[in-house]
Amino acid sequence: MRIGLGYDVHALAEGRKLILGGVEVEYERGLEGHSDADVLTHAVADAVLGALRAGDLGKHFPDTDEQYRGADSLALLGQVAAMARAQGWEVVDVDTVIIAQQPKLAPYREQMQLNVSAALGIAPDAVGVKATTTEWLGFEGRGEGIAAQAVALLEMRSSAV
């Protein structure tokens, strides 16, 4: 078994959709980035890549490559999961937390969970999605950006051993 840790942060910006866990969240600003800037999905992808000891999301999908401009981060996560399977690993459990003062994310968490689990090819109950505020402290509390953390547990398939 292997464990990986992922972290991502993006600044909030005018004129962008707010996408978290593949869900369009109603909010007056979105996250700035080369792709859809989905911090939750990026953190999960980095956690899986970390468990694989394969670098990070930027190594595999660089923001200098125009083919990833506006990319759907769930599709990128699906590619990361396929990479893990190709190496004989299965993602067996993921836990996440989104750090944002606003907007309130509780109404969207279940769909985020379903989207991330589908991209990884695992059961929804193997994916935890939580959200927390920073009590108005830090860049998240000031409404400058949103961050996410994730941890992923991978297990070598018995047929690959």
Image: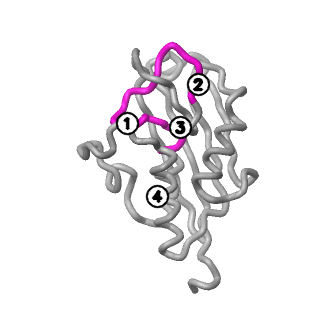
SS class, disc 4: helix
CA distance for labels 3 and 4:
20 Å
Q: Which mark is residue 70?
A: 1
Task: Write the residue at 47% across / 17% down.
Answer: 29
Earlier along the polypeptide chain: callout 1 or callout 3? 1
Q: Give the range drawn in magenta.
A: 24-42
Question: Residue 155 lies in what quarter of the image?
Answer: bottom right
- What coloring was used for the rendering? one colour
CA distance for labels 2 and 1:
17 Å
Question: Residue 149 lies in what quarter of the image?
Answer: top right
Residue 96 % position (x, y): 62, 44
Residue pointed to by mark 3 = 148
Q: Which mark is residue 79?
A: 4
Earlier along the polypeptide chain: callout 4 or callout 2? 2
Q: Which residue type does callout 2 highlight?
A: Val
CA distance for labels 4 and 2:
24 Å
Q: How crowded is mark 2: few (under 14 residues within 10 Å), some or many (20 or more)?
A: some
Describe residue 63's horizontal placement relative to residue 114 as left or right: left
Q: Which residue type does callout 1 highlight?
A: Gly
User: In the rendered view of the protein, which quadrant contains the C terminus?
Assistant: bottom right
Q: How crowded is mark 4: few (under 14 residues within 10 Å), some or many (20 or more)?
A: some
Residue pointed to by mark 2 = 25
SS class, disc 2: strand
Task: Write the residue at 53% across / 49% down.
Answer: 44
CA distance for labels 2 and 3:
15 Å
SS class, disc 3: strand
Earlier along the polypeptide chain: callout 1 or callout 4? 1
Q: Which marked residue is nearer to the observer: mark 3 or mark 4?
A: 4
Say above or below: 3 vs 5. Answer: below
